[in-house]
Image (tube, rainbow, N blue to C red):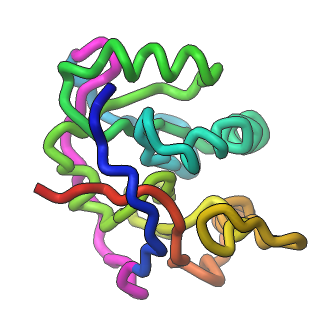
Amino acid sequence: MTGWLLGVILAVGADELPVNPIELGAGLNLAGDVAQLKMGENRAHVLVFVTDQCPIANRYAPEIQRIEAEYGKKGVGFSLVYLGSPKYAPEYRKHWKEFGYQIPGFMDPELKWVKATGVTVTPEVVVFDAGWRMKYRGRIDNQNVEHGKVREGYRRDLRVALDEILAGLSVSQPTTAAIGCIIPRG
């Protein structure tokens, strides 16, 4: 396993998102090949930051896949981003397969995408519009009050943001605090 620190924190990022397009640069796909994220015909793109050892990210795997199945049909692309060294690619591929992901997987070993987007925990998502402008950064939903406690009647933040983007609206809540496993910064 990758040996990631599994501390759990409430991540409170900056309230403001950058207004200019974000240049992420190339990443590595799960085969270890250099690959570029592409918008293609998509109207938006979601990066889902995960680690293979984060129990909170693992618990969200079915919901991530449900969201991708629903919104992929509406012109939204998705990519799963693993954080760690390419030497752990076999573990990431195993995790990807065991959790039944169909979403393209990438690795961010130098945390370039983490730094460019400002994510701080896993799972955390970033949504870009077709011009690679960040429109949402934060949690998938707010069902986690704190580690181990789930709220009823929670807000489905990622779905709300995607609905607003697809409707041509501004995202009403562009940043939210995510609860998850700390992304170690080197």
Task: State whether residue 41 appears in this view.
Answer: yes
Residue 90: image quadrant is top left
- The kind of secondary structure the magenta stretch mainly shows is loop
Residue at (65%, 45%) from the top-left corner? 60
Residue shown at 64% from the left, 20% from the top: 100
In the displayed structure image, the side of residue 89 where residue 151 appears, left or right:
right
Position of the N terminus, as image quadrant, is: top left
Total residue callouts: 0
Q: Which residues are magenta?
A: 13-32
Quadrant housing residue 11: bottom left
Residue 22 in the magenta stretch? The answer is: yes
Where in the figure is residue 185, as x and y percent of width and height? 17, 59
Q: Is residue 164 above or below residue 81?
A: below
Residue ranking furthest to the right: 153
Task: Decide if residue 75 is in sight here.
Answer: no
Q: Is residue 29 above or below residue 80?
A: above
With 183 as the anchor, is 124 left or right in this view?
A: right
Horizontally, is 80 left or right of 182 in the view? Answer: right
Residue 158 at what x, y percent from top left? 65, 61
- Name, please, the residue furthest toward the left: 186
The residue most toward the bottom is: 15
